[in-house]
Image: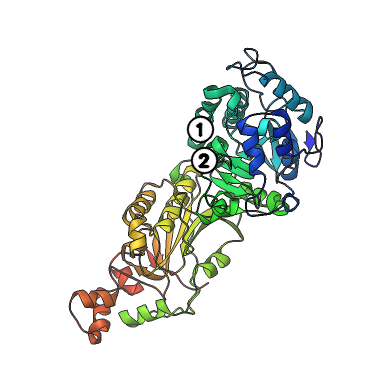
Amino acid sequence: MRSGGSGGAGERPAVSGEADGRRDGEGAAAREGAAGGRASTGVGAATLPCARLTARQAIAAVADTYSEGAVPDGRGTAPGASSAPDGPLGWRGYDDARARARERTGEDESVVTALATIGGRETIVLSFEFRYLGGSLGERTGDRLEAAYTHAREHGLPVVSLIATGGSRMQEGMRALTQLQRVARQSALNRAAGLPQLAVLRDPTTGGGWATLGAAADVILALPGAQVGFAGSRVRPPDADPAAYTAEGQLAAGHIDAVVPPDRLRATLQRWLQLLGTPREFEATTIEPAPPPAALGPPELPESGWGAVVRARASGRPRAEAYLGAYFDDREEISGDRCGGVDPGIRCGFGRRQGRTIAFAAQCGTATRPAGFRTAARLVRLADRLGIPVLTLVDTPGAANDAAAERAGAGAAIADTFAALATARVPVTSLLIGEGGSGGALALAAPDRLWATPDSYFSVIAPELAAAILKRDETQVHETADQLRIRPQDLLDLGVIHGIVPPA
């Protein structure tokens, strides 16, 4: 086993990928990756200490120990050989370019695969060597990746990808591009086997490497200032906003979960691997439901329907952050719906409570937007695949109903959240901690395991809106609230909730 702090045999000091591309004429993939190394936000290379690590240095930066020999090298020809001179296309100078890349890097391909321990967890690590033809994917790369994914399935291990690539290797043409299909299939097989996949986006992560290894991962982390995008800098429109192609831009658009500084990356990966646990086959009936949190507000039940509304809408009432902080010992969050949206009014992730992992999706008291529903559905499906019970905290005046929400597909997003909860094999526990506004709240409520705090209410419609629909004046809103029977004790009598939780 190699020590996580060692660089590994054959390593040389990192050489600028941009200079490599100019000297060797390695083609579009290398030039693209090199160009992407210049952060478009104006961040200099000196502020990105992990962006240009070698493949083995990147592994050593996050792993306790690792061993390359423990993972099969993949089928195909011997390392460094090819089925025909200059590859499948007979690309003149390709063999020479690969020879120079081997001499410069000590590697015989653009990816290093290894069995590593990260925070004591055995993991398959895939680490790209950008100095080898821009970290591009060719047939031999596909062989190695397929073998590594297969090894992970055979041994029930998570996969961590440390990506730095400019895309598919131009000198192998369509034979290189079809490697993306191989990678996508392997990723899907591991997903079906319930094995977690984590990706770290180094600089750059573009083209097929982003669209397969990166974007398909369960948890996607990125280094600050890294170029991230399907289109690299040399092929995107000249007037394109450069910020959209950065790690920070992808985070804002809901496509990655977090931007992590290099000095925090190792600890962050350790926490994620601890939270997602050792994958295993499971029966839904054997998984203990998450216990509902204790109430953090006053224990008294409201005397009237309007009194319940006033208490639930009080600005000082405990919200999701207070409940999550009291419930979990430690937690990490995912972010975004992977469709271009982020809703700051919902918190989703995984936490540790008394030694076990519980997934959570928590509304924060604002109108939930389509991106929030889609993020929650993503969280529930991921937890279901990994055999992790789910806790949802319900607290919203309702789904966002403005024009932007409609254009973003509010109805479809809510429907998808209903479907995710309805089809989950793992138990879902829900706690109503404040406002329960119509279908926007019900979408995150477990149909058979819903609890409520004393300072909450659930209603088919807000009392004010109900009065307006019935053409009642403002003096009749309180009466309408009583008629709707929205207090926690009313919900219990109606069989809507399982119980009212007391304070701790």
SS of the residue at dot 1?
helix
Give neighbour class at mark 2: few <14, some 14-19, many 20+ (Cα, 10 Å): some
Observer-nearest residue: 219 or 402?
402
Q: Which mark is residue 216?
A: 2
Residue 64 in the image: above or below residue 486:
above
Q: Position of residue 96 (x, y in %)?
A: 72, 20
Q: Position of residue 31 (x, y in %)?
A: 64, 35
Point out the image quarter for the N terminus. top right
Q: Which mark is residue 372?
A: none
* Residue displayed at 31% across by 66% down: 438
| Left or right placement of residue 180 versus residue 434 in this view | right
Residue 244 in the image: above or below residue 176:
below
**Which amino acid is tagged 2?**
Ala
- Residue at the far bottom: name it: 475
The answer to whether residue 111 is seen in the rendering is no
* Residue displayed at 69% across by 36% down: 130
Q: Position of residue 235 (x, y in %)?
A: 54, 39
Identify residue for label 1. 184
User: Do the CB atoms of the residues marked 1 and 2 lie less than 8 Å apart?
Assistant: yes
Residue 227 in the image: above or below residue 111:
below
**Which amino acid is tagged 1?**
Ala
The answer to whether residue 409 is seen in the rendering is yes
| Label 1 or label 2, whichever comes before in sequence order | 1
Based on the displayed image, in which of its 4 quarters is residue 99 positioned?
A: top right
Whole-number angstrom distance, CA of label 1 to CA of label 2:
8 Å
